[in-house]
Structure formats: structure tokens, C-alpha cells
Image: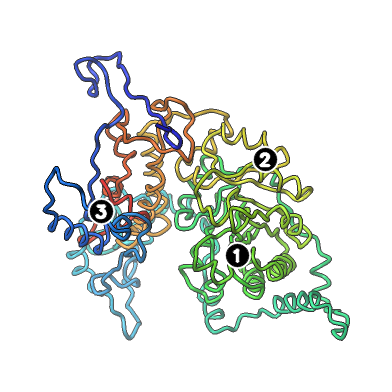
Amino acid sequence: MSLSGVCLIKPEQVFQNSTSGHNNSTGIFRYIIEEHQPKVAPDCAPAKDKEEIHSKNEGDTVEPDAKKPRLSKKEKRKLHGQNKSRPVFKQNKEKELCNSLINTAVGKELPTCNKQKCFFMHDIQEYLNSKPVDIGDQCYNFNTAGFCVRGLTCRFGKEHVTSDGFNIVNEEKQKDHLQIPERTVNQLSHDLQNLLKKRNYDFKFAEKIVRYNDLQKKNSTNSGSITDEDIIKTLSREKKSLDWKDKLLLSPLTTVGNLPFRRICKEYGADITCGEMAMCSSLLQGLPQEWALVKRHHTEKVFGVQLCANNPHLLTKCGQMLEKETEIDFIDLNLGCPIELVYREGGGCGLLRRPRVLEACVRSLSQVLSIPLTVKTRTGVYSTESIAHDLIPKFGEWGASMVTIHGRSREQRYTKLADWQYIGRCAQAAVPLPVVGNGDILSYEDYKTARESCPELTGVMIGRGALIKPWIFTEIKEQKLWDISSAERFDIIKKYVNYGLEHWGSDTKGVENTRRFLLEWLSFLYRYIPVALLERPPQKINERPPRFHGRDDLETLMASSAASDWIKISEMLLGKVPEGFQFLPKHKSNSYT
């Protein structure tokens, strides 16, 4: 039998200490779980699939020794692929306290709500009597900042909420906390949001840049000379520069690359971080959920925003606005997004099929910016037709300051291994343009092999490897393989939860947002295999292990691929899930337990 793609686990370990709780009478603990029969966890499967499974079981009258009926393609697919339209937590406004009343400090007068139509509660005692029981006694925000902005609605508010509905402030801690005035920047202001919604934002400069490049492209004889002073100054000015040499970059990761996760990666050694892919059209409409992707924590010393659009008009306007309104160090153009909807509309990988539009996008966006423009691309659209080596030198001519190449095509998605030989070819073709490689780095050994096989590379970007083991940056910098314990890993999760409560809030909505993003991250974290259990360390990103026991119960729980077990981990830190809660994992295979 071929062992390709299988991560070999040690079958057993002999313990020296015969009193260990894991030992049987012979002092041997077996790691591999044999003859495991997976079952569907009802709370983690969509209703349609549950109905199909139920009807199948009800009508199954086949004798045990009889031949199994042939399944249709639809039946084979029912618990494979992805769950679409996953449920999102919603609050009942009538049971929530009005924002004007939640954060009144002790000794201050209670304000009154001035809204004519406010659907929230205004009776503080009624709210406190109906409020769910606190999840814990210690509020992370109060302990670190001296105050909690969620006040009375905090689910950890026992130590800072008085019985008569006031919010306690520790003035000494608050003073220390305010030494850094803005810990999270790039917030969407009401004034900017109104300008964008009413289409009153001044984009004249961006429009001039796009028009200039249109005329240059057409090379029209009757267009006359272009003498606009703004454009001439822009083309002649010197861009700010960044040092990419030997840096470890955290990849822009949709959904999971949020601010709390980036903080974790920074603490473990990531040099440069980038926000999740943001759609230009949504940013220009002033949508808060899209602007949340632009937020930056003060610990992110070098931070960029990744943009996705299908035309130079949107990209250039967005670039002009972000440089003026936010604190960012670079803008990254997404040419690698494989999502079908984005691709069909000509964005992401779709731009690789439209060379003229692509040139206009890179040129215009580069010219409107004084900060570096970087480009992240794949090898091409099709696995049989790699085109990145031809495009990358052009990116430099068009104004890009650095290019990241993911060694797979759109067609491959994340199947097969990243082609580092091709990445090296691209780096050679791009000289002197800095090139960063991306794909399948899960250990220092992988990093070392990549750098040795591609000496022209400037740096390395890590995506899934950081999701599976965020301490990978430490491993690379210290050139070691870290056999991290389950307790240490749980501390990382605990820290993420605290950062989530600080970022999304410690009220019910914030708790459930934190839970949701934690569960999404756990869908990657469980893939880590402890070093001591491996027959041939280090772990490879494309290898999957048999089901196994960890060295303790927590390690076993954290290695579970079942979404129902991820929910248990979330409940250890965020309390019981609310009534009617359902988490549908992105991949249906994780509905098994």
C-alpha cells in the first residue's frame, strides 16, 4: 500500500513511570486509534444533509450480508465539499441595553437616550435582572486597561459593574493604558463614511491618473501633450521604501487573518503583516464590515492592506483614499484569489487573463501611491500554463516594489505541492525586483530547503503554516523544531480569546464573534501533530495522519477533526454556546465525529 500523503505516527510508546495515568498494565500507551468509525455530529451538519442521512437510515432495510446498494453521485457528495451560507449570530435588540446607558462611570449622572426610535432597552435594573449569567469573574479588558468599554453588557463584568448599574474605572491602570493613545488605528469615522456613502469624496486625482494612463495606452496623436502638474510631480517623486530582505511575512488570510490572530503571529516573530483581502467596491461604499479588515494594531510595525478589484478605476480611488485616511506601510494587489465569483468578474486570478487591464491597474495604483505597491500572484490560471515568469519582470516596469508568488495555479487551489523550482525561476527572471516565495512552509526545514533551492528569493511568506502552528516564525528564527505542549498551545488559544474580546467586545455579540473566529481558526489548528509522536519529523503540510491519541487528554481533544470538539474547546474559554447555536464548519468533512 502506498504511504504517499500519509503522516506516520509512532504506534506506541513505552512509559518509564508505571504510575502514569495513561499506562496500562504493561506500561505501553498506544497512540494510533484503530478501527475508528466516524459518525455525523448533528449540530455541525446542515439541515438538508441531516434530512438526507435520516431518510437514508429510516429506509435502510438491507440485510447485513446483502450487497450494499450503489450510491448516486449526489449521495456520495452530501458530506463532502463546503457548506455555503453558514449561519451568523444575531442579537434580539429588544433584550439588549441601549448604547447610551452601558458605560456610565461610578459618580457620573446617567445620560438619557435622545433617539426618537430606539428599539433597545432603557430600564437598567430590568436589563441586569434579565442579563445572562457572567461567563467568568475576570474581565481581560478591565484588568489590562482599567476600564471596559462594554460596561454593563460585559459578560465578564462581575468585578467592574455595580449592582445599581454603573461601570467601575481603575484610574491608575487607565492612565497607564492611555500612554498609547490609539492601540487600534484605521477606524472608519462617521464623517468619512458619510462622504463615501453620498459619493462626495474627492477622487479627482485618482481619476486624472487613470485618464493619463488611458491616453498613454491609446497613444492617440490628437490627445496633445499631458502637462498636468499633479501627475508630473507624482511620476517624478520618490517612493517610500521598505526592507524586504530575509523578512518573514504573514500571508493575507481571508476570514482567519484577523487582527487578534495577527497579534499572535507578531508575538511569535512575524516581521511583516497584511490584512485580509478587502474588496475595493465595498471600501468605497463605506461598509463597516469591509473597513474592519483595514484595522491595524499598534504592535504591527510594518502593516499592509490587500486590495481586490477588477478595474483600475476602483483600485486607484481606493489607493488614494487609503493612503490619505489610514496608517499603512504598503498596499498589496491581489492577483491570486481563486474564488469563483471574484474570478468570473475579472478580479483576483481573473486579472491574469486580462493583460491590458492588469497593466493599467498596476501602473495607476502605483502612480497614485507614495508608499510601496506589492503584488501577490499565483503561477497562472491553469496548472498546464504557467505565466508568472513572464509577468513578474513587467510588474517591476509598471511600478511594483515587490512581488509575492504562490507556487500553485488557480486550477490547483491547494492541491499538490507548491512548485518552488518555478518560484526560483520567477525570482531569477525578476532581478532586481524583490520576490517573496509562498507555499507549504510548515517548519524550519521547509524554510531552509526553500531558501537553498531559490537563492535569489528576498524573503518568505507563510499562510497555512502559521494557521496550523503560529510559533513557526520562532522555529525559523531559532532554527529548531519546537515540541510544544498541549498546555502551551492552550495558552495561545486563551491569549487569542482575550485579544478577540478586546477587539470585538466582551458583550454577548463580541463573545459570539470571538467564538466564531476561534472555531474557524481551530479548523486549522487541529492539523498540528506533536513532534514527539512523529516517526519522521518534521510534519509536512500535505500529509494527513491516522486518528491518534495525544500524550494527554487536552492534546487528544485539540487533535480532533470534529467540529463538535472545537465547540467544546470554545466553551472552556467562552462559556456554553447560546440556545439554538449551530456552527457549520467550512468543510463538510469536519461534521464527522
| Marks 2/1: CA–CA distance | 27 Å
Q: Amino acid at mark 1?
A: Thr
Q: Secondary structure at mark 1?
A: loop
Taking the spot 21% from the left edge, 68% from the top edge, the residue there is 127
* Amino acid identity at mark 2: Asp
Residue at x-position 68% and y-position 54%: 388
The residue wearing badge 1 is 326
Q: Which numbered disc flags the more N-terminal residue, 2 or 1?
A: 2
Three-letter amino acid code of the residue under disc 3? Arg
Choose top left, top right, bottom left or bottom right for residue 86: bottom left
145 displayed left or right of 593 = right
Q: Is residue 461 above or below residue 76?
A: above
**Disc assigned to residue 138:** none
Rendering coords of residue 350 (x, y %): 59, 66
Q: Earlier in the sequence, mark 3 or mark 2?
A: 3
Circle nearer the viewer, 3 or 1: 3
10 Å neighbourhood of mark 3: few (<14), some, or many (≥20)?
few
Find disc 3 in the rendering and name its residue: 70
**What residue is disc 2 on?**
246
Q: Position of residue 51 (x, y in %)?
A: 20, 62
Mark 2 or 1, which is nearer the eye? 2
Element under disc 2: loop
